Image (cartoon, rainbow, N blue to C red):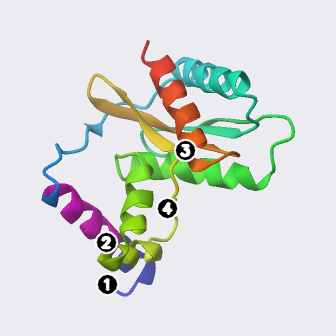
Amino acid sequence: MNNPKLVALVLAASVVLAGSIASAQTPPPSYGAPLSLDQAKKAMTGAEAEAVKNKWNVVIAIVDSGGNLVMLQRMDNTQFGSIDVAKSKAHTAVAFRRPTKVFQDLIGQGGPNLRLLNLQGASLLEGGVPIVVNGQIVGGIGVSGVTSEQDAQIAMAGATAMTK
């Protein structure tokens, strides 16, 4: 493997996989068909409602099961830097089939988990969650603009709204 990005990705995936096995968690869901535009709109509506309710200005990004952007919304007065962060969180949640909080928590533990800092193109911040329907990942939602915990709260509201 001569590609440093590929080596870093394989290493990070191995660390995440080893952590999952060590903690005896169930395997992540498999990929399903990409979510539709109507499903993305439902998720966006749910996420936006949570953000508005709490008076949080954020960017909300929704990707399909292949990590492709389906919808993006930047609420008024949200810093434009959050656009790329929200997209990255959504993409990471789908690419690694788990909430981005997993990475944030592993980094917080330090030690060998700090190798994840070499994971290029992935968000290591909470606020990205996979959207799961009938046990399969159909997309992901990423939010940026407030604290990581608040971003995740909004993302979960969106993912939950889509599955209702």
Q: Which residue occupies 49% across, 61% down?
A: 124
Q: Residues within 10 Å of mark 1 (few under 14, many from 20)?
A: few
- The secondary element bearing badge 3 is classed as helix
Of the residues under marks 3 and 2, which one precedes in the sequence?
Answer: 2
Q: Secondary structure at mark 2?
A: helix
Residue 23: which disc?
none
Q: Residues within 10 Å of mark 3 (few under 14, many from 20)?
A: few
Does the segment drawn in magenta span residue 14?
yes
Q: CA distance from mark 3 to mark 2?
A: 28 Å
- Position of the N terminus by quadrant: bottom left
Residue 69 visible in the displayed image: no
Question: Please, what secondary structure does the residue beneath circle 4 have?
Answer: loop
Q: Earlier in the sequence, mark 4 or mark 1?
A: 1
Q: Is residue 130 left or right of residue 46?
A: left
Residue pointed to by mark 1: 1
Task: Identify the mark nearer the N-term, 1 or 3.
Answer: 1
Residue for badge 4:
122
* Residue type pointed to by label 1: Met
Q: Do the residues bearing badges 1 and 3 touch, measured as CB atoms within 8 Å? A: no
Which label lies toward us, 4 or 3?
A: 3
Expressed as whole percent of the image width and height from the top left, the position of residue 5 reads 44, 77
The residue under label 3 is 149
**How far, Cα to Cα, is label 2 from label 1?**
10 Å
